[in-house]
Amino acid sequence: MKKKRQEEKKQAITLFLELKILLEEDQANATEYFGVIQLLDGAVQRVSKEKQIPQLQAGAVFENVCALALVEKVKFSAEASAALQRIKEFAQPKGILGGFSLFNVVNLFPLFR
């Protein structure tokens, strides 16, 4: 179980860094991507220090990046969009128990606002 968690952690960090590198390479829109890059840096730190489960952090990153893109009217390249899609797929629950766990978290979330 611990080995699986380490592999998931490594995969999440790799996905976050991949998107960050793609955004940093696009010098024309560097200022537009500043908030997204900061968000990705925070996600890498949280996952590497094991403060957050990799799948939950990937889901939070996907939602926050999409929200930032919508609010700031940021457009991603095709490669960056594909990397963001891979983050979304990684965040999806695997198996039936993961789906139920996500369902419970989603239903309880409005109670904590």
Image (spheres, rainbow, N blue to C red):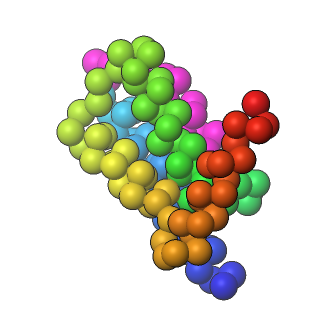
Question: Is residue 41 on the magenta stretch?
Answer: yes
- Work out which quarter of the rendered image holds the N terminus and state it: bottom right
For residue 21, what is the image quadrant?
top left
Please name whichever residue, 73 or 18, is drawn nearer the observer in this view of the structure: 73
Closer to us: 94 or 54:
94
Magenta portion: prevailing SS class: helix
Image coordinates for residue 91, horizontal then vertical, percent: 49, 57
Residue 78 as seen in the image, left or right of residue 50: left
Region in magenta? 27-43
Residue 22: x and y, percent? 34, 40
Question: Does the magenta run of residues contain 49?
Answer: no
Residue at 57% across / 34% down in the picture?
39
- Residue at 59% in and 66% down: 100
Q: Is residue 9 visible?
A: no
Placement of the C terminus among the 4 image quadrants: top right
Residue 28 quadrant: top left
Taking the spot 77% from the left edge, 38% from the top edge, the residue there is 111
Spot occupied by residue 80 in the image (x, y as percentages of width and height): 30, 40
